[in-house]
Image (tube, helix red, strand yellow):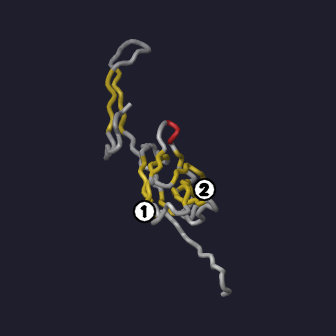
């Protein structure tokens, strides 16, 4: 190699330990809370972390869901608009992005929607007037009530 020249080296900086919590109780929908472990020395060259929903672990068919700066290792979507339909997306992927380019091989995690609904709903109408209702509604609760705050 000629004197005075440097050989460029390719550096890979990827997140690890991607985790996800489903805060939505509807089938095929999620409200995301995504967390990850940043790469070592993430303050060098990484500007942001980019999150996408994708059709596979390689990040195909990416649909952006958010972006955060270095130093933030969790991203959440909350509120009524947070229901994210999973019928066409099966993975959440997290990519690092530098000032030069975004990572092409993301860290990925398969999504699993948690569905919790009641069953055996019944209503005994005890009001004898026409167009009036009164009585008790009963139902069977889901096997696990984790994440359920109230029934409405």
Which numbered disc, 1 or 2, marks the residue closer to the eye? 1
Label total for image: 2
Q: Residue at x 49, y 48 (%)?
A: 28
Horizontally, residue 135 falls left or right of residue 13, namely: left
Residue 33 vertical position relative to residue 93 in the rendered view, above or below: above
Q: Which dot marks residue 17? A: 1
Nearest the camera: 121 or 21? 21
Whether residue 100 is visible, yes or no, is: yes
Q: Quadrant of residue 138?
A: top left
Q: Residue at x 51, y 56 (%)?
A: 92
Q: Residue at x 59, y 60 (%)?
A: 98
Nearest the camera: 76 or 150? 76
Nearest the camera: 21 or 9? 9
Q: Quadrant of the N terminus?
A: bottom right
**Mark 2 packing: few (<14 Cα in 10 Å), some, or many (20+)?**
some
Q: Identify the residue position indicated by label 2 in the image.
A: 62
Residue reaching furthest top? 129
Horizontally, residue 127 falls left or right of residue 32, namely: left
């Amino acid at each position: 190699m000629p004197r005075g020249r440097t050989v460029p080296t390719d550096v890979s900086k990827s997140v690890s330990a991607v985790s996800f919590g489903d805060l939505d109780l509807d089938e095929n929908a999620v409200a995301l809370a995504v967390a990850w472990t940043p790469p070592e020395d993430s303050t060098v060259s990484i500007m942001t972390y980019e999150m996408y929903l994708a059709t596979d672990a390689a990040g195909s068919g990416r649909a952006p869901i958010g972006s955060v700066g270095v130093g933030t290792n969790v991203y959440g979507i909350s509120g009524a608009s947070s229901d994210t339909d999973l019928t066409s997306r099966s993975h959440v992927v997290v990519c690092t992005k530098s000032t030069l380019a975004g990572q092409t091989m993301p860290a990925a995690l398969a999504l699993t929607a948690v569905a919790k609904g009641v069953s055996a709903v019944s209503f005994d109408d005890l009001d004898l007037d026409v167009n009036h209702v009164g009585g008790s509604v009963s139902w069977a609760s889901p096997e696990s009530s984790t994440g359920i705050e109230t029934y409405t």
